[in-house]
Amino acid sequence: MYDIEKWEKAAAFHGHKCGGLAIGFKAVEALMQHITTGAAEDEQIVCITENDACGVDAIQALLSCTIGKGNMIYKPLGKMAFNFYFREKGEALRLYFKAAKAEDMPHDEWLEYILNAPAEELFDYSKPSFELPERARLFRSETCSICGERAREDKFRLKDGKPVCLGCFNEYDR
């Protein structure tokens, strides 16, 4: 049986209950079966998600991995996979959601299946192929010579020898 209190916490953060949220919720449960953990205060836990779907919200709500804190990194690969790293323990685990919904399965049945199925039936476990990212850095801000707005110094390009933010820079991709 899944932890209803944690499920409700994830749903409150996300705004509704859906199969995608359930996948992220079960990923957290599966992770905790392999590596005991709680929520991250800082960057003790890092998640590299390979998707930007609903399940990411469960990971944010339950493990406190967030983009703002620097311990949630999005790699747009389109796979329902989550890579977890534990800095202090030196451990890492990738969870890939392998279950497929039957075409005619109603939404409610799919949701209940995910919430109640054993983790081994839902996920493949492996080592992440990504290296553990460095800790989040703090950057100085610079002023764009075109729009006058400030942005992080690592997000600038030079145009005619002047600093230009990415919003004003015309990428040359011939």
Image (cartoon, helix red, strand yellow):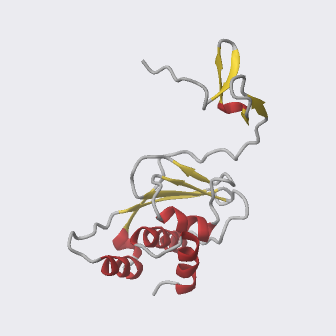
Residue that appears at 45% across and 59% down: 53
Residue farthest front in this picture: 147
Q: Position of residue 103 (x, y in %)?
A: 21, 69
Q: Is residue 23 left or right of residue 15?
A: left
- Image position of 92 with respect to 145: above or below: below
Residue that appears at 48% across and 52% down: 128
Residue that appears at 71% across and 17% down: 162
Q: Is residue 92 left or right of residue 50?
A: right
- Image position of 7 with respect to 145: above or below: below
Quarter of the view holding residue 40: bottom right
Q: Position of residue 43 (x, y in %)?
A: 69, 56
Q: Nearer the viewer, residue 170 or 117?
A: 170
Residue that appears at 60% across and 69% down: 61
- Image position of 127 with respect to 30: above or below: above
- Image position of 95 with respect to 33: above or below: above
Q: Position of residue 133 (x, y in %)?
A: 61, 45
Q: Position of residue 111 (x, y in %)?
A: 37, 77
Residue farthest left in this picture: 104
